[in-house]
């Protein structure tokens, strides 16, 4: 078994024990054929917390046989030119294979066929999910501290929001586990009947991001387990620690071996292997649109597995002249500054009606200035550092681009001295639609503020993007709220609020922001396969024809 490590928490004087191996069949094990490590860094101090076993970085044809080898190796080669592959070259130099993914998938397949899937009742799945939720709630403080160390976000945010919501998510889907039903369909009441079953789709590869490591874990795991699927989870290479810690709770809750497996891995390896694997039935991914395209391609070129994608965004908020400007400024600040802007639905474009532009902007700057970006263990912090040096450099490249392209930086835009990947709230005005800061997803606390005269112009500006994940509008005109909410091209539209999600309400994107839905009853459709059964109990077939 792989040995755990202890991480000292200077702020509390406590030590956190963290497993460092691959989690397969309810055990933490070393890699089949690699000694490579993923180095986990504290973004507040830039110090290495610990190293965990990484799935190796270079594929080897010996891993696969027959046509599976040709498909998988070719697809992984296509991933090799990506940014993730370049990062892999920095983290690990030796050749390896994707054998760990194969072992995990085999474990998940065996569990699906024997101790999970159709072999366990919905009531039992519900019981285990509720037990897992209880354990997460019990360990909320410890999980929050580990999340803060590895991701940077404030402990209080991780504990009260991310983990609190994750516990509720598990309980929500626990309630669905014995309520997955089909239909009885009339065909001929005298001789025939048809009915449908919603069967678990099978082995699911789940690839989660670094911005909400625990919450995205819960969003993926809860509906999949409720439906009876088994899982191979690939956490982000930047933030694998809480996924490994949660794997301990999988064992304690009593889930059978192989139901949930966790493989810390680079995206160009684990993500590519899962997406192209011939024995994976579905892949769920949250991350960039660029990577989402690669996953769709790999899924299509392998076994045409089912895919759900929650991808990027460049979400707008419209501030109309009838809006409560005090409240609207708070929601706009929350929209771009929550999680230090590292949010797929970050409201990174705000358009304000010309008649209230100056008054709103003054309030917005005041609200942004009031937020403290600091260390995660400081109770005063409402936001932490960004997750990594890679992300830090990316954000600053966009800030410099905004300045060079002629936007006016009215807040922030200056680097701090000292250690830590801290980026203070930054607001640009005098923006134009073709500027990079207006077009591209930045994933940081960088806001572009524009103006509009008419409702039609505001809608046109808001929809002028290839993304369609979220959008918001602020108005006290009820008719306008209905018109504009219907006109905005986004999977989620907030009216007089922003960025709040609920476990019973579906979430997902339009356009290049993804396909499929998370949360709510709609998420169950992503993990089930509908089977139609035609039953003849009375018709005698005339033969020959």
Image (cartoon, helix red, strand yellow):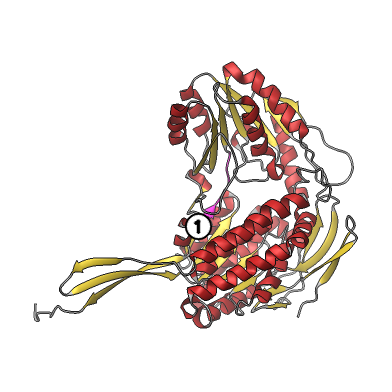
Residue 194 lies within the magenta run:
no
Q: Would residue 490 be seen by someone viewing this image from the given angle?
A: yes
> What residue is rendered at 12% in x and 80% in y?
540
Looking at the picture, how far across and down is residue 286, in whole percent? 59, 55
Residue 311 lies within the magenta run:
yes
**Image quadrant where one finds the N terminus:** bottom right
Residue, disc 1: 308
Picture quadrant where residue 111 is located? bottom right
> What residue is rendered at 39% in x and 67% in y?
181
Looking at the picture, how far across and down is residue 384, in whole percent? 78, 46
Vertical placement of residue 83 versus 137, above or below: above
How many numbered marks are there? 1
**Image quadrant where one finds the C terminus:** bottom left
Vertical placement of residue 228 versus 1, above or below: above
Which stretch did the figure color magenta?
308-314
Looking at the picture, how far across and down is residue 144, in whole percent? 75, 57
What is the crowding at mark 1: few (fewer than 14 residues within 10 Å), some, or many (at least 20)? many
Q: Left or right: 487 with respect to 394?
A: left
Q: Would residue 81 be seen by someone viewing this image from the given angle?
A: no
Picture quadrant where residue 37 is located? bottom right
Q: Secondary structure at mark 1?
A: strand
Q: Left or right: 483 with respect to 106?
A: left
Looking at the picture, how far across and down is residue 355, in whole percent? 58, 16
> What residue is rendered at 77% in x and 68% in y?
52
Nearest the viewer among 260 and 130 is 130
């Amino acid at each position: 078994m792989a040995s755990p490590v202890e991480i000292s928490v200077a702020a509390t004087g406590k030590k956190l024990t963290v497993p460092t191996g691959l989690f397969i069949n309810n055990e933490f094990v070393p890699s089949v054929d690699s000694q490579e490590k993923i180095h986990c860094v504290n973004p507040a101090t830039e110090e290495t917390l610990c190293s965990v076993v990484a799935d190796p970085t270079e594929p080897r044809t010996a891993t696969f046989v027959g046509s599976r080898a040709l498909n998988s190796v070719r697809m992984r080669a296509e991933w090799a030119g990506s940014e993730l592959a370049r990062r892999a070259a920095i983290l690990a130099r030796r050749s390896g294979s994707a054998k760990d993914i194969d072992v995990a998938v085999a474990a998940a397949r065996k569990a699906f066929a024997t101790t999970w899937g159709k072999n366990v009742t919905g009531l039992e799945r519900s019981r285990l999910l509720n037990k897992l939720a209880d354990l997460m709630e019990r360990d909320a403080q410890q999980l929050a501290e580990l999340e803060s160390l590895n991701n940077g976000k404030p402990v209080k945010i991780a504990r009260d929001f991310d983990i609190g919501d994750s516990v509720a998510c598990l309980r929500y889907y626990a309630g669905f586990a014995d309520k997955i039903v089909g239909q009885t369909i009339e065909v001929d009441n005298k001789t025939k009947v048809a009915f449908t079953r919603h069967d678990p789709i099978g082995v699911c590869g789940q690839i989660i991001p670094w911005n909400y490591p625990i919450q995205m874990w819960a969003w993926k795991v809860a509906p999949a387990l409720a439906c009876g699927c088994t899982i191979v989870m690939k956490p982000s290479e930047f933030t694998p620690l809480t996924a490994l810690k949660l794997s301990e709770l999988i064992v304690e809750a009593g889930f059978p071996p192989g139901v949930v497996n966790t493989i810390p891995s680079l995206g160009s390896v684990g993500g590519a292997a899962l997406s192209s694997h011939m024995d994976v039935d579905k892949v769920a991914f949250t991350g960039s649109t660029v990577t989402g395209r690669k996953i769709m391609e790999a899924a299509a070129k392998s076994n045409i597995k089912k895919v759900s994608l929650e991808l990027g965004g460049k979400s707008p908020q419209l501030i109309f002249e009838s809006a409560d400007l005090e409240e609207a400024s708070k929601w706009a600040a929350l929209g771009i500054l929550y999680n230090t802007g590292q949010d797929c639905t970050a409201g990174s474009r705000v358009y304000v009606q010309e008649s209230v532009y100056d008054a709103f902007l003054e309030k917005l700057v005041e609200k942004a200035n009031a937020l403290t970006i600091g260390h995660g263990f400081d109770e005063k912090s409402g936001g932490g550092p960004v997750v990594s040096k890679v992300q830090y450099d990316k954000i600053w490249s966009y800030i410099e681009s905004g300045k060079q392209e002629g936007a006016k930086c009215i807040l922030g835009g200056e680097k701090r001295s000292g250690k830590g990947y801290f980026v203070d709230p930054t607001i640009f005005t005098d923006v134009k639609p073709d500027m990079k800061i207006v077009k591209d997803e930045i994933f940081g606390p960088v806001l572009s503020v524009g103006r509009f005269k008419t409702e039609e112009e505001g809608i046109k500006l808001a929809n002028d993007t290839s993304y369609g994940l979220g959008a918001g509008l602020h108005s006290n005109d009820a008719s306008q709220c209905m018109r504009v909410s219907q006109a905005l091209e986004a999977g989620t539209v907030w009216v007089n609020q922003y960025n709040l999600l609920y476990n019973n309400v579906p979430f997902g994107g339009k356009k290049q922001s993804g396909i499929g839905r998370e949360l709510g009853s709609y998420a169950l459709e992503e993990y089930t396969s509908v089977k139609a059964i035609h039953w003849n109990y009375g018709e005698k077939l005339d033969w020959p024809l």
